[in-house]
Amino acid sequence: EVQLVESGGGSTQPGRSLRLSCTASGLTFDDFGMQWVRQAPGKGLEWVSGVSWDGATKGYSDSVKGRFTISRDNAKNSLYLEMNSLRPEDTALYFCAKTRGYSGSSDDAFDIWGQGTMVTVSS
Amino acid sequence: SYVLTQPPSVSVAPGQTAKITCGGNNIGSKSVHWYQQKPGQAPVLVVYEDSDRPSGIPERFSGSNSGYTATLTVSRVEAGDEADYYCQVWDSDSDHHVFGTGTTVTVL
């Protein structure tokens, strides 16, 4: 069974940092692009960042560019999101998702999702 | 930036057909994907590339895309179809993935 499990969420203050992780199992991890998508409480889905199968191509939404960094370690079947200079508006449930293809920046759908990890930014 | 507009809510009686629209500028030239999200759960892909269904998704779920509107159709609606539905595209101009505003489907 293909599974994605996120971790690393928690409560923190504005301006601080957090690192999210997503561990994959049941698939050949380095065959696929990966994404981070977030959902603020009671709100819709918002794409955050994506990365290609080899980590070479990365993309970010305008709201996180320059503050968040996506990376992956294929040897550990893991995806990461380093979040710096956190703001209250970053408060959300963060999902990792697998792309159907190898790219992180293409029109491929997100076919497998984790259950999410909650990030709360408040003073 | 590219915007996808969905109706906030759609109500449908059991056994009837629900149509959920997703409007965007020349969306017919893009590949549209649809996700179902039930309360407290992660999204699930129900239609990809306008009209294809992943393995395990019932044939009752179908999609179309033309001009300025993409549509997800749920036939013979069941109580278990009650959920939020989101459309999504890749915007090559901005190199961003974009989600629609989301539609809550209520089964009467």
Image (cartoon, helix red, strand yellow):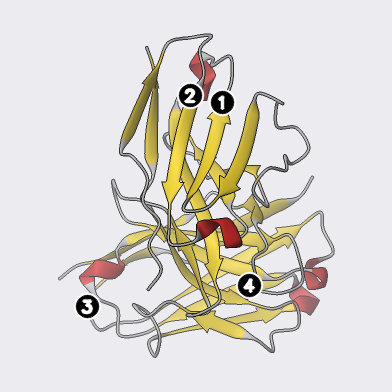
Sequence-wise, which precedes: disc 3 or disc 4?
A: 3
Which of the 4 image quadrants contains residue B51? Answer: top right
User: Dot 3: what SS?
Assistant: loop
Let me know if residue B45 appears in the view.
Answer: no
Crowd class of label 1 (few under 14; some 14 to 19; many from 20; radius 10 Å): many
Q: Which residue is mark 2?
A: B18
Of discs 4 and 1, which sits in the foreground?
1
Labelled pair 2, 1 in contact (Cβ < 8 Å): yes
Q: Is residue A85 above or below residue B63?
A: below
User: Dot 1: what SS?
Assistant: strand
Q: Are marks 4 and 1 on the same chain?
A: no
Of discs 2 and 3, which sits in the foreground?
2
Which of the 4 image quadrants contains residue A90? Answer: bottom left
Q: Are marks 3 and 4 on the same chain?
A: yes
Q: Position of residue A13 (x, y in %)?
A: 23, 74
**Chain letter of the residue beneath label 1 in the structure image:** B
Q: Residue at x 41, y 68 (%)?
A: B2
Cα separation between marks 2 and 3: 43 Å
Which of the 4 image quadrants contains residue A51? Answer: bottom right
Between B10 and A63, the residue placed more toward the observer is B10
Q: Position of residue B22 (x, y in %)?
A: 44, 47
Crowd class of label 2 (few under 14; some 14 to 19; many from 20; radius 10 Å): many
Under mark 1, the amino acid is Val
Q: Position of residue A83 (x, y in %)?
A: 41, 80
Let me know if residue A34 appears in the view.
Answer: yes
Between B83 and A94, the residue placed more toward the observer is B83
